[in-house]
Structure formats: C-alpha cells, structure tokens
Amino acid sequence: MSKFYGFSATSISGEKIEMSDYKGKVVLVVNTASKCGFTKQYDGLQELYEQYKDQGLVILGFPCNQFGEQEKGGSSEIQEFCRLNFGVNFPMFEKINVNGPDAHPIYQHLKSEKPGVLGTEGIKWNFTKFLINKEGDVVERFGSTTKPEKLKAKIEKLL
C-alpha cells in the first residue's frame, strides 16, 4: 500500500509541495469549486482549520472544474475568491482533475484507497473529502453533502 506522503502537488502560488511535508499531521483533502452549491463549505473548512491546526490538522484544497464547470478561474482568481469571501488560509493547490485519465496522482491514490458508494472510485461532485491519519493512511471518505463540522469527532480521534 502506497502512502499519501509519496506524492507532490503544485500550490496555488506555483510552488511544488511534497505531501511528506505533512508527515505526522492529520490531513483533510478536499476538491473545491468557487461557483458550487457547496462552496459555502469553505466557511466550515476554515473553522475546522482554525480550531485544530495547532493540534496537527491540515486541510488541503484542490480546485477542480470537472463538475458543471464551477471552477473556471485561474489560480490567482481562485486564491483571491477564497481569501476575500471565506478568509481561507489553509493550503490551496492549482486546479486539477480528480476523475478520468488526467486525474492527479494524489486523487488516483485517494480513490483507490477509499472507493465511494458500491465500490465506485469516481468523485461524484465538488467538496468530496478524504481524511488521512498521521501515518499517511486514507482512513475515510465523505461525500459533498457531509458538512465539515460533522467531521470534528473523527478528526479529534485521529489527533
């Protein structure tokens, strides 16, 4: 079983980030979009981050335009939108694909480790969440309708 720490991604500001930088932390990976019915979940994600970051939680946002073209902007536009509208200061990454042949390797890994309903690997919509423990194991997957605040007990257990 390959670990989450073996991957890297490009931050929204253009720098390569190794997932191994997050060793020993609880990580919540979320595919995001700025023009989605679930976009208000940025508030809940930011609240989780503020509440638990000093205890070892990191949230990683991966913008994606594969669902209803709800993330059309470029990196600077996405970053500005997140900061101005939701005060987001957790790590954000450049826009990626989460499904299909061009899916980012991180998402290929996450989906194979924790398939969705009935064993399907595909991400169904924006704001699907993957919870990763301090050892880099993908421990749980949550659909778009699961609000960030509903993850508190699970996060606390892993911290």
Image (cartoon, grey):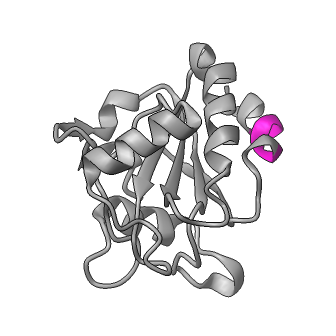
Nearest to the observer: residue 27 or residue 88: 88
Q: Residue at x 64, y 75 (%)?
A: 116
- Please indicate whether residue 18 sits to the left or right of residue 90 in the image: left
Q: Residue at x 32, y 73 (%)?
A: 103
Is residue 67 magenta-colored? Answer: no
Q: Position of residue 147 (x, y in %)?
A: 76, 52
Q: Position of residue 126 (x, y in %)?
A: 56, 67
Is the C terminus in the top left, top right, bottom left or bottom right quadrant? Answer: top right
The residue positioned farthest toward the top in the image shown: 54
Residue 107 falls in image quadrant: bottom left
Q: Residue at x 67, y 49 (%)?
A: 41
Count of numbered tags: 0
Q: Position of residue 136 (x, y in %)?
A: 47, 42
Nearest to the observer: residue 28 or residue 77: 77
Magenta highlight range: 150-154
The answer to whether 72 is drawn above or below residue 87 in the figure is below
Q: Magenta: predominant secondary structure element?
A: helix
The answer to whether 143 is drawn above or below residue 21 in the figure is below
